[in-house]
Image: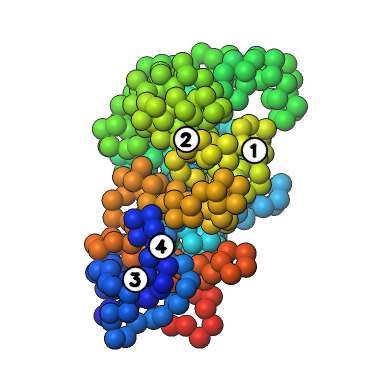
Amino acid sequence: MQTILRSSKVLINEEFIPADIVIEGEFIKRVDKYGINEVAIDLKDKKVTPGIVDLHSDALEKEIEPRPNATFPMLLAITELDKKLSMAGVTTMFHAIGFEENPKKKRSIDLAKQQIEEIYKANKNHLGVDNLIHARFELSATDAVEPIKEVISKKMVNLVSLMDHSPGQGQFKTLESFKSYYSKYYGLNDDEVDEIANKKINKDEEKIKELINYAKKYNLTLLSHDDDCIEKLDGLLNLGVQISEFPLSLEVAKYAVSKAIATGMGAPNIVRGGSQGGNIAAINLVKEGVCKYLCSDYHPTSMLQAVYKMKQDANLDLAKGFSMITSTPAKYANLEDRGEIKEGKRADIIVIDDSYIPKVILTIKDGESIYNAIKGFKL
């Protein structure tokens, strides 16, 4: 059975053009000249784009615990978030699961492994969008190496990022800033903070290399996190890192791009007009052409809004902005079957009404409607 969508604004090769999209089964069979087909669903001037591909989101944590100590069952949270993703136009989600012992954020190595297994099972059985895994490895968490290798070996992981929250670099420029943050935020005494600091400083380099080599064996894309200096980037480049998430300065972002390392920033940073953590405003990187893609970080609905915000604040062409949340992240994640409206690609498509505040009014995943806000509309 075929479905044909028609619009005067279909995103193809970073340009909105009139076209008919012929869908057959899970895939786009072909893209035809506008109006050539006798029967088609006419979306008029509504924008039609590929589904959003989100490489990094912690949104599941908020779905599990929307208020402190008010927790919901994991499987219920996964299922409910999946529905919200379809409404946001996200058709491919990478859940960023942190392998670290962090009671304040309700993170642990055992819980991370459990979440990955639950997401993987649910994704195979009943979820609407593709819920994939981005495993985040805190470099000091040596105990996490074997559990991460296990889930990688079961092909449950799609991306691996390296996090380094040790004092003296990255988020914590000095040992004093590290101690101040941990004592205030986590309510720890001096001895407890010293123990954590020593563990983070004295990392097991052999174990880190072991995990990196294991990820490479499975052809997984490696990412870094909160890069703060050129020297750190050089070291990461030698390890095989291909993406720098949330670089902390314009200088670092420019250097990363010059070395063919992709740079990703948070869409909420764009929408809110700045970083929640006081770091560089993502729009500054967009203006300089050194932000290559956006991720939702913790707020999936920001993805669509960020595209229009970049147009407003950086005069970035809308079509280019949409590529930063569709084709570009798909390419970086080695997902060659999606991210574009093109013959042979998956029929992951969203329809947008931007006559007022931009909103997704139809989400199609693998050729089927999974969210529909168009009154009287049927595929």
Q: Amino acid at mark 4?
A: Phe
Mark in the foreground, 2 or 4: 4
Dots 2, 3 in contact, CB < 8 A? no
Q: Position of residue 32 (x, y in %)?
A: 27, 72
Which residue is labeled 2 in the image?
Answer: 290
**Label 2 residue SS:** loop
Label 2 to label 4: alpha-carbon separation? 23 Å
Q: Mark 1 sits on what residue? A: 275
Residue lying at the far front in this picture: please name it. 315
Q: Residue 360: horizontal and vertical position, in percent?
A: 52, 66
Q: Secondary structure at mark 4?
A: strand
Query: Is residue 122 visible from the viewing direction of this image?
Result: no
Q: Nearer the viewer, mark 1 or mark 4?
A: 4
Q: Work out whether 333 lies above or below 257.
A: below
Mark 1 element type: loop
Q: Position of residue 149 (x, y in %)?
A: 35, 34
Q: Quadrant of the C terminus?
A: bottom left
- Residue drawn at 28 percent across, 79 percent down: 36
Please say if the residues under marks 3 and 4 sit with CB atoms less than 8 Å apart.
Answer: no
Could you give the CA–CA distance between mark 1 and mark 4, rounded to whole angstroms?
31 Å
Residue 194 lies in what quarter of the image?
top right
Q: Judge depth for marks 3 and 1 and give the one in front.
A: 3
Quarter location, residue 221: top left
The residue under label 4 is 16
| Residue located at (36% from left, 30% from top) | 260
